[in-house]
Amino acid sequence: MKFLRSERYAAFLLLGAAVLGVILANTAFGPALQGARDFHLGIPWLALDLSVGDWVKDGLLAVFFFIAAIELRHELAHGELNSTRKALVPTVAAVGGVIVPALIFLVFVRDPALAKGWPIPTATDIAFALGALALVGRALPSRVRALLLALAVIDDLIAILIIAAFFTTDLQPIPLLVAVPVILLFGWLSSRVRSAPIVALLILLGIAAWVLVHASGIHATVAGVALGLVMAGTSAGKTRHVLEPVSNGFILPVFAFVAALVTLPSVGITELSPVFWAIVIALPVGKLIGITGGAMIASALAGRGGPKGIPLGDIVAVAGLGGIGFTVSLLMNELAYDGNHEIAVEGTLAVLVASVIAAVIGVAITAVRSTHYRTKKAG
C-alpha cells in the first residue's frame, strides 16, 4: 500500500489507465466496454438511475473531491494558505490560471452552443502535477512543491465552484436544504469518533448527503467537498490517510480509464472542431501564461519577490506543471458536452493531448531548475 501513496506511482497509474482506455476503446473490445460503461445500475427507492460511467463520475469522484477538501482545509488551517500573505501568490496564480485559458478557449470557440466548454482548460490535476514534480524535481526547494500544492488545491476549489454554478440543472431546493443539517451533523459527529458504530454512522450520513445533493440537481461531487470541509481535523487526517491509497490506486485510474473509453474520430486533423484546438492550446499555453503572470503580479504586490522570495524560474516550472488538466478537465468535458457525443469525444482526446504537452513542458522546465539547484549546491 505504501507505493500507492507515492505521487510518482499515482501519476503513472493515472496515465497508464487513460492510455489503456483509449487503446481498448479502439479495438474489438471497444463496443463491449463502452456498452458496460453505459449500462444503467439504478436504485429506484432512492430515485437514482445512473449508468456505470455516471456512478464513476458522480460517485467515485465525490470521494476524490472529499480528500481534496480535507487537504484544502488543512492548508487553510496549518499549511501554505493559513495567512493572507502566504495565500496571496498561489491564489492569484490560480485565478490567472483559470482566466487566461478560459479566454483563449473563447477566442477559438465562437459558437455559443460549444462555448460552454470554456471551463475544460481551467483545471490542474493535483495527482499528476505533483507526480511529475516528484519524478524530476527532487533537487528543488520544498517551497516549490508547497506552491504547486497550494495552487492545485485552490484550482480544485475554483473548479468545484464552477461545477456548482454552471453545471447545475433543475435546482431542487428541498433536498439541498435537507442536505445542510445532514452535512453539519456529519461534521459534529466526526469530532466524536470513539467506536466503530460512529464510523458506520458517519459513512451513512456521507452517503445520505451525497444522495440529497444529487437529488438537488447540483453535481454530486460537491457533497464530497462539503463533507471534507466540515470534518473535524483529527478525524479528517486519519480518513485522508486511509482513503489516499484507494483514491490513487483505484478511484482516479478507474475514472481515467472510463473517461478515456472513446473511439478515435475518423476525420482528418483539419476536420477537428475548434473545441479540440482550443483545449490543446488553452490548457498548456494558457496555464503557463496565466499562472506565471498571476504569480508575478501577486509577488509584486507582496513585495520582496513575494512570500519566501520564490524565483521566477521556479514559478514558471510550477506553471508548466499546472497545465496538466487530466482528471478534472475530463470531468468538465463530460459535463459541458453531455448529449453531444462527437464533441465530447474530441474534447476527451484534446484533454489527453494537451495534458501530455503540458507534462512535457513542465517536466522539461522542472528538470532544468532541478539541475540548476544541483549545480548550485555542488558549487
Image (tube, rainbow, N blue to C red):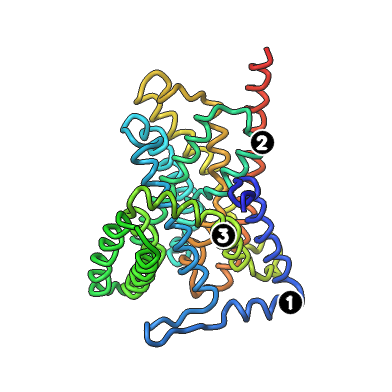
* Residue 358 in view here: no
Amino acid at pointer 2: Val
On the rendered image, what quadrant is the C terminus found in?
top right
Q: Position of residue 270 (x, y in %)?
A: 67, 60
User: Does residue 309 appear to the left or right of 12 in the view shown?
Assistant: left
User: Does residue 243 appear to the left or right of 169 in the view shown?
Assistant: right
Q: Nearer the viewer, residue 258 or 283?
A: 258
Frontmost of labels 1 and 2 is 2
Say which quarter of the image contains residue 309. top left
On the rendered image, what quadrant is the N terminus found in?
bottom right
Frontmost of labels 3 and 1 is 3
Amino acid at pointer 3: Leu
Q: Position of residue 106 (x, y in %)?
A: 46, 53
Instruction: Identify the residue shown where x is 29% and y is 60%.
Output: 189
> Crowding at label 2, few (<14), some or many (≥20) Cα neighbours within 10 Å?
many
Q: Nearer the viewer, residue 42 or 298?
A: 42
Q: Alpha carbon of mark 1 to alpha carbon of mark 2: how far?
A: 36 Å
Amino acid at pointer 1: Phe
> Crowding at label 1, few (<14), some or many (≥20) Cα neighbours within 10 Å?
few
Please give the label number shown on residue 86: none
165 relative to 232, above or below: below
Q: Where is residue 258 in the image (x, y as percent from the top left)?
A: 60, 68
Q: Label 3, on which residue? A: 252
Counting residues from the start of the chain, the first of labels 1 and 2 encountered is 1
Counting residues from the start of the chain, the first of labels 2 and 3 encountered is 2
Q: Label 2, on which residue? A: 136
Q: Alpha carbon of mark 2 to alpha carbon of mark 3: how far?
A: 22 Å
Q: Where is residue 362 in the image (x, y as percent from the top left)?
A: 61, 39
Circles 1 and 2: CB distance less than 8 Å?
no
Say which quarter of the image contains residue 323. top right
Please give the label number shown on residue 29: 1
Instruction: Identify the residue shown where x is 50% and y is 29%.
Output: 143
